[in-house]
């Protein structure tokens, strides 16, 4: 995928990732270097399926879904490589995960995942989610590409 096609939205994301709504948690990809990293965006809307129960009267995006959105961002970088097209990237680990800010309706998450080390089908990436300049979450994500 060339830089000229960026940014791109759901249709192109769905051509790379196997995730589908309601579990596709990124809205657009802003930057992409296959096999190296990606930057994506998630607009947290008031009508998100998970907010009705998390929490009634005080809607907050669950931390696990922020981490999943980060993983999907990393998966775009991994699965956009020609050798990995059509495969699944699965979690193999989540390390050093910290939540620094509540994410609520109206927030826009900027999600970044930079791949650090890839050996065969297993790799690690440093990931962070920000709302504006504020860090919301950071983690080191380990993945395995299903062969």
Image (cartoon, grey):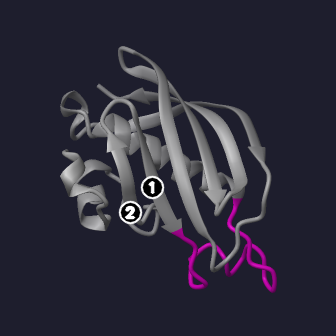
Residue interval drawn in magenta: 43-62
- State which quadrant residue 140 falls in: top right
Q: Which mark is residue 28?
A: 2
Report the residue at 34% width, 44% height from top: 32
For mark 1, what is the residue? 40
Report the residue at 66% width, 52% height from top: 64
Q: Secondary structure at mark 1?
A: strand
Query: Which percent across, then down, holds residue 121?
Result: 37, 20
Report the residue at 18% width, 32% height from top: 82
The majority secondary structure of the magenta stretch comes to loop
Q: Is residue 47 magenta?
A: yes
Q: How many marks?
A: 2
14 relative to 38 in the view: left or right: left
Q: Secondary structure at mark 2?
A: strand
- State which quadrant residue 105 falls in: bottom right
Q: Are marks 2 and 1 in contact (CB under 8 Å)?
A: yes
| Quadrant of the snapshot with the C terminus | top left
Q: Which mark is residue 24?
A: none
Structural distance between the alpha carbons of marks 2 and 1: 6 Å
4 relative to 62 in the view: left or right: left
Query: Which percent across, then down, holds residue 96?
Result: 74, 32
53 relative to 82 in the view: left or right: right
Query: Which percent across, then down, holds residue 130?
Result: 64, 56
**In front of the other: 132 or 29:** 132
Q: Residues within 10 Å of mark 2 (few under 14, many from 20)?
A: many
Q: Is residue 142 magenta?
A: no
Query: Which percent across, then down, holds residue 74?
Result: 45, 41
């Amino acid at each position: 995928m060339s830089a000229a096609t960026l940014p791109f939205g759901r249709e192109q994301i769905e051509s790379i990732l196997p995730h589908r709504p309601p579990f596709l948690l990124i809205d657009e990809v802003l930057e992409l270097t296959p096999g190296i990293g990606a930057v994506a965006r998630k607009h947290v809307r008031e009508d998100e399926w998970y907010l009705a129960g998390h929490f009634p009267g005080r809607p907050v995006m669950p931390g696990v879904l922020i981490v999943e959105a980060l993983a999907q961002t990393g998966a775009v970088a991994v699965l956009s490589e020609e050798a990995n097209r059509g495969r699944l990237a699965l979690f193999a680990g989540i390390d050093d995960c910290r939540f620094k800010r509540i994410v609520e309706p109206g927030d826009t998450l900027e999600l970044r995942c930079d791949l650090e080390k890839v050996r065969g089908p297993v790799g690690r990436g440093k990931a962070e989610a920000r709302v504006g300049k504020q860090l919301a979450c950071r983690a080191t994500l380990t993945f395995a590409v299903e062969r």
